[in-house]
Image: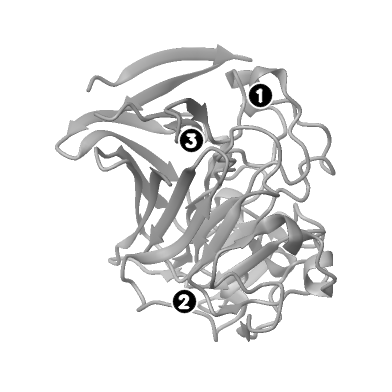
Amino acid sequence: MPIIETAVRARGVEATIYTLRNAGGLEAEILTYGGTLRALRAPGRDGQMADIVLGFDDLEGYLGPHPYLGSLIGRYANRIRAGRFSLGGATYTLAVNNGPNHLHGGPGGFHRVLWEAQPLDAPDGPSLTLAYSSPDGEEGYPGRLSVVVSYTLTDRNDLRIDYEARADRETVVNLTNHAYFNLAGEGTIHGHELQLAASRFLPIDETSIPLGELRSVVGTPFDFRRPALIGPRLEADDPQIRLAQGFDHCYVIDKTPGELAFAARVVEPESGRTLEVYTTQPGVQLYTGNFLTAEGTIVGKGGRAYPQYGALCLETQHFPDSPNQPQFPSTVLRPGEHYRQTTVYRLGVR
């Protein structure tokens, strides 16, 4: 299938939207600004197509403030306590942009850069490879980091994201995509059904930094080992949830380290759309759009204001604050090493 290129421009920034379409008619739009998953169109049980990710109609929306809608995140996804970490005997200071902590690579993270793009009609389906070279010291991180991210929309109805990185100095890396999914295409996710392949989660403090333990989900509102509606869980009287007025927690995936394995399944019963997530990463951050309204009214596609709980994110990643918590799996990347990880979003109908 041909890959469609559309040039866009705003505030002097020139970017490109690449539209990937597979043999079954699924479409994914990738914006080179922020490496953004701008749209993902999938059919429901009745064959009707819907765009199931939040975003904006034009480049202008992405240039303004927004909560990482569809963005590639780096150098470090999630939070680092107090914006500081030590490595190799040196202490590094990062931007504090989320209360007292550093979040998602800082205000000038990978969500705010233009990626170089190379489209390819691959055997599995249309693919787009994005590349960015982050200079030594960018946002306070040590070393030059060369990053390559490939989006492939396969004929199996998988949106596969492959991440690679190399560094010329010892540094820390934790990459992800911050897509906001709503399988109904509108409204809230209260009626979505969620299953997570996770028997443990990371409890957090009042600033959303992990306490350091891997706590069992048994007997808590965090237990999604069996499919459960999200809505009732958002009303649960649990202090660890109420801290964020919803879920914004990292789950420990039950799997062998490094293997590509099942992590999550989401079902929207009315449309019948399903989303399965597979990843090589050790964790997945469940975020239920708690702050979509608290951050100000976000007017997205079609002029619609996105409500609180208007989407959920399943951010496959290493654990938050790992550089400061040595008991967590390491996020250190050294010269000569090759960072690689894969996440697959599999779309279907029930």
Expressed as whole percent of the image width and height from the top left, the position of residue 220 reads: 71, 79
* Residue linked to disc 3: 37
| Relative to 39, residue 332 above or below | below
The answer to whether residue 92 shows anywhere in this view is no
| Relative to 319, residue 139 above or below | above
Q: In what quadrant of the picture does the N terminus appear?
A: top left
Q: What amino acid is at disc 1?
A: Gly
Q: CA distance from mark 3 to mark 1?
A: 14 Å
Question: How busy is the neighbourhood of tag 3: few (under 14 within 10 Å), some, or many (20 plus)?
Answer: many
Q: CA distance from mark 3 to mark 2?
A: 27 Å
Expressed as whole percent of the image width and height from the top left, the position of residue 321 reads: 62, 71
* Residue linked to disc 2: 330
* Residue linked to disc 1: 61
Left or right of 177? Residue 288 is right
Of labels 3 and 1, the one closer to you: 3
Of labels 3 and 2, the one closer to you: 3
Q: Residue at x 26, y 43 (%)?
A: 156
Q: What amino acid is at disc 3?
A: Leu
The answer to whether residue 283 shows anywhere in this view is yes
Secondary structure state at the residue bearing disc 1: helix
Question: How busy is the neighbourhood of tag 2: few (under 14 within 10 Å), some, or many (20 plus)?
Answer: some
Q: Residue at x 67, y 46 (%)?
A: 189
Contact (Cβ within 8 Å) of mark 2 with mark 1: no
Indicate the quadrant where residue 227 lies.
Answer: bottom right
Q: Residue at x 61, y 60 (%)?
A: 286
- Going from N to C along the chain, the mark reached first, 2 or 1, is 1
Question: How busy is the neighbourhood of tag 1: few (under 14 within 10 Å), some, or many (20 plus)?
Answer: some
